[in-house]
Image (spheres, helix red, strand yellow):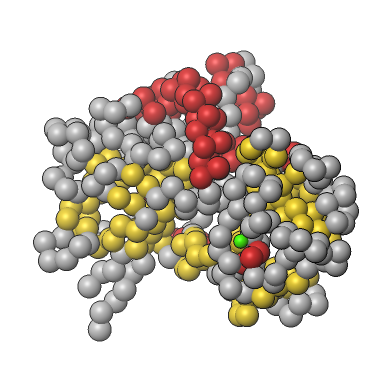
């Protein structure tokens, strides 16, 4: 009997790195506005990324100069918690507060779970408007799900609509007993603007929760001008995670090699003829096209931590996956400001995703098959409207 192994290569846009600092490592909200907003962040961080990248290579290759912190990698079972994100709220019923409007922004019981997101323009009728300073929205998924992330968005700034305060998320199996997931304040929400409007996007990681009912408890000032109530589930899969270096394009040697650094996983394609995988990544897997189908197959794995790797030719029409763990520089600096004086302004580059990927790659075997999902290997691009792009692999 054929055994199917699901193995996912999850592509996190680079903004997930900055998300790490606030602890929202899995928060990825689809939407062009998010991409655009974070593109500017990427530019702002570019110099720092290069600095961190160089430091990372030092860490990889010269442990005598820097003491690597001890890391306790999770047991392999924990990879089951890695997320293949699926939007499961589409078409689900939901309840809203009272004080619904009587115009085109009157909620119709459909638009907040139709899977369609509103733009940054609050005048768009994809928003539902409520004249209230607080209220609960509850989505009924119809079935119990292993959850991954919950998000919504609100718009404010025009027509006297005041900036909202916060969204508190909670989940329930029966709609009566609720488990608190957490609160995202508006000041911490990702935001984008359009002609006086500001759209705030609230996302929370709920990877350790299961539930059927999702409650959004809104605190606002005078209006709740709300968009899609999105709930993401996860399938239990093995996962390798990749950061898209420039936010959209996968990392390719020769393009901007200084950006492939600490705390990142990356794909290198054969886009640049003769490109090699380099020598400083901690762990590397090589994938070649399968001759019999549309899959790829692992042909080599390098896991010699901290040692220079051999030069690896990216296979024709194949790719190489590389992962390098990050350091929690603020913690290291706090532990010994003299020793880590150079890292005073470095950020926390650790993330569960990359740690898991780093561990998982050592357990992969030559011959494992993978299928790209939400990744265009030919053009070296990721699907923009999905925070987590994937590769699913079946091993026949
Ligand atoms: Ca909608």
In percent of width and height, residue 156 lies at 75, 44
Extreme bottom residue here? 1
Q: Nearer the viewer, residue 229 or 83?
A: 229
Q: Nearer the viewer, residue 97 or 187?
A: 97
Q: Is residue 158 left or right of residue 149?
A: right
Which residue sits at x=42%, y=53%? 389
| Quadrant of picture, ligand 1 | bottom right
Which residue sits at x=77%, y=57%? 129
- Which quadrant of the view contains residue 239? bottom left
Q: Is residue 181 left or right of residue 33?
A: right
In percent of width and height, residue 361 lies at 35, 52
Does residue 298 show up?
A: yes
Q: Nearer the viewer, residue 374 or 114?
A: 114
* Residue 123 higher or lower than 232, as above or below: above
Q: Nearer the viewer, residue 166 or 290?
A: 166
* Residue 67 higher or lower than 177, as above or below: above
The N terminus lies in which quarter of the figure?
A: bottom left
Does residue 240 show up?
A: no
The C terminus lies in which quarter of the figure?
A: bottom left
Which residue sits at x=71%, y=50%? 154
- Which quadrant of the view contains residue 138? bottom right
How many labels were placed on the picture? 0
In percent of width and height, residue 320 lies at 26, 44
In percent of width and height, residue 301 lies at 25, 49
């Amino acid at each position: 009997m054929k055994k199917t192994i699901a193995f996912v290569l999850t592509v996190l846009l680079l903004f997930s790195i900055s998300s790490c600092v606030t602890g929202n490592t899995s928060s990825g909200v689809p939407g062009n506005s998010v991409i655009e907003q974070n593109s500017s962040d990427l530019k702002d961080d570019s110099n720092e990324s290069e600095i961190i990248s160089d430091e990372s290579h030092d860490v990889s290759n010269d442990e005598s100069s820097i003491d690597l912190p001890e890391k306790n990698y999770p047991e392999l079972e924990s990879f089951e918690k890695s997320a293949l994100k699926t939007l499961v709220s589409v078409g689900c019923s939901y309840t809203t507060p009272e004080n619904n409007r009587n115009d085109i922004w009157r909620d119709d019981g459909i638009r907040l779970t139709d899977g369609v997101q509103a733009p940054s323009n609050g005048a768009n009728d994809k928003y539902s408007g409520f004249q209230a300073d607080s209220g609960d929205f509850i989505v009924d998924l119809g079935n119990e799900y292993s959850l991954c992330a919950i998000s919504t968005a609100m718009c404010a700034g025009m027509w006297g609509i005041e900036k909202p305060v916060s969204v508190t998320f909670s989940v329930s199996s029966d709609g009566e007993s609720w488990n608190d997931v957490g609160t995202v304040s508006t000041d911490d929400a990702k935001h984008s603007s359009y002609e006086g409007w500001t759209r705030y996007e609230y996302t929370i990681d709920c990877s350790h929760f299961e539930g059927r009912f999702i409650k959004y408890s809104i605190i606002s000032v005078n209006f709740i001008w709300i968009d899609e109530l999105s709930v993401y589930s996860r399938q239990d899969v093995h996962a390798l995670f990749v950061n898209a270096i420039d936010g959209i394009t996968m990392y390719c040697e020769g393009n901007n090699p200084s950006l492939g650094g600490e705390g990142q996983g990356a794909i290198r394609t054969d886009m640049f003829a003769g490109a090699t995988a380099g020598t400083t990544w901690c762990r590397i897997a090589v994938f070649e096209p399968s001759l019999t189908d549309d899959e790829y197959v692992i042909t080599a794995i390098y896991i010699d931590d901290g040692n220079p790797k051999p030069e690896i030719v990216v296979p024709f029409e194949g790719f190489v996956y590389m992962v390098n763990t990050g350091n929690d520089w603020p913690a290291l600096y706090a532990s010994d400001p003299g020793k880590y004086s150079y890292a005073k302004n470095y950020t926390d580059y650790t993330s569960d995703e990359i740690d898991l990927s780093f561990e998982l790659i050592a357990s992969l075997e030559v011959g494992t098959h993978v299928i790209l999902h939400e990744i265009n290997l030919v053009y070296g691009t990721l699907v923009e409207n999905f925070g987590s792009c994937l590769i699913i692999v079946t091993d026949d």
